[in-house]
Amino acid sequence: MDTLYWLINTQTLGGMVVLAAFCGALVTYIFMVRWIAQGAQEDHK
Amino acid sequence: MSPIEQVVFAPLRKTGVRFYLLCAILGVLVLWGVYAYYLQITEGLGVTGLGRPIYWGIYLTNFVFFIGISHAGTLISAILRVTQANWRRPITRIAEAVTVFALTVGGLQILIDMGRPERVLNVILYGRYQSPFLWDFTCISIYLMSSVTYLYLPMIPDFARMRDKLTDIAPWRKWLYTVAALGWKGTHEQHRRLEKAIAILAIAIIPIAVSVHTVVSWIFGMTLQPMWHSTIFGPYFVVGAIFSGIATLFIAMAIMQKILHLEPWLTDKQFNYLGLLFLVMSVLWSYFTFSEYMTTFYGALVDEMHVANAKIFGEFNWAFWTMVLCNGIIPFVVLIRRSGRTVLGTVIVSIFVDIGMWLERFTIVAPSLTRPRLALEWAIYQPTWVEASITIGSMALFALLFVVFFKLFPSLAIWEVEEGEEIEERGRLIKKLSTQDLRAMEKA
């Protein structure tokens, strides 16, 4: 319980969670687009 | 070029005077809003009707309204895609564009509401995750990114078509389409990957969209303000969001159908089916509203009754009853009959619903703040011309982004529509075949 309290009440930690979620989603979508673009080469092989 | 390409590409190749005129009008309205915002920044929030204890007013109303509209798109498009509703194909692009621009303008309202907008960075620098604002920040930023991706992915094959077939356009546009097409060749593997990615995103985006408006409702629901501290605010907001989203989508669809000559694809079928969903949302919204007010009146807590009375019988009664008329009565009377679920019928109802839903957001935001629990802090909220100008400017910005977007990019997902036509054609052929033919085919 103390750990949970610390996690949600510590300054900056919340901001880091937001940043991590944002960056995680961004990287996932970039890889998704890259995977689609590479589909042309796969077909060629 | 195929017939659909000829129609869809026509406005991308030629620009008439009407386009520039529309952009000029919307641009002037946006600039007027920018001027009002400049005054607000230089003079301070004193030029608005905001102040203690009414910290949130029209700007937060706009925020909730625009975020609500954003559910039009991606959520409706995703649900229809997941359920494989074939009639969705001509409306998905418009719906997804509504989402992205509504989210952009909605997010701006938070910055506008802040007296010191640069302090928005404090959310990252000093944010603690116990604050619902951080939940909001997380959900909205992920939703915006997901919506942009969800809009972009089905556009890739269309970018390739424009790259290959639009020869009479400016070089920078040619370059834009080439880059955005990602070297698309339309191979089997590329199509397979694209459709898989769209399907995954469509499934993922539904809970994201639901979480967004639930969390938006929690910035109210997690406080102890009278009539905000409600357990049904989450689903109530989500239903209202989809409801206002469909309304905006109908208006956009009707305008584009007329101006861009999309009648062969945006047919009565789309307006009828979506009209039925619209009717369901109206009934659901009415049910939630009744439930919300019924429990307030039955409990009759003193602080809550002050707010409820102000809404229903007091200074906000004009907004409350207009909201009931626009969101509950008019949609039900018009949409219940098949003859009401036409282009004209749905557009008229949609205009009322958009007005009604904006007022609904207003009657949630303002009355509770004018009557806080300490009676000595009661206040009157009177929005000023600055707030009205910024609101009009924001709406004009939304429209301007939409108009410019569809000047550069196709209004229909051409490959998806063609695919849908092929599926329908095959279905028709199968129906024509007799049982004997089918047996012979099975044997073969």
Image: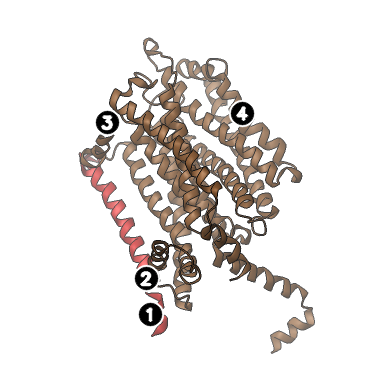
Measured from the top left, where is residue B285 in percent x and y? 58, 36
Amino acid identity at mark 4: Val
Looking at this rendering, what residue extends furthest in the top direction?
B376
Q: Is residue B249 above or below residue B389?
A: below
The crowd level at tag 1 (other Cα within 10 Å; few <14, some 14-19, many 20+) is: few
Q: Is residue B286 above or below residue B343?
A: above
Amino acid identity at mark 2: Trp
Q: Residue at x 48, y 63 (%)?
A: B154
Name which of mark 4 and mark 3 comes first in the sequence.
3
Judged by depth in the image, the label closer to the viewer, 4 or 3, is: 3
| Subunit ID for the residue under disc 1 | A
Q: Horizontally, is B432 left or right of B373 in the view? A: right
Which picture quadrant has residue B251?
A: top right
Which picture quadrant has residue B333?
A: top right
Colour-to-chain, red:
A
Q: Secondary structure at mark 2?
A: helix
Look at the image and name its color scheme. Answer: by chain
Q: Residue beneath label 4, please?
A: B324
- Closest to the observer: B380 or B430? B380
| Subunit ID for the residue under disc 3 | B
Q: Residue beneath label 1, please?
A: A41
Q: Secondary structure at mark 4?
A: helix
Q: Residue beneath label 3, please?
A: B116
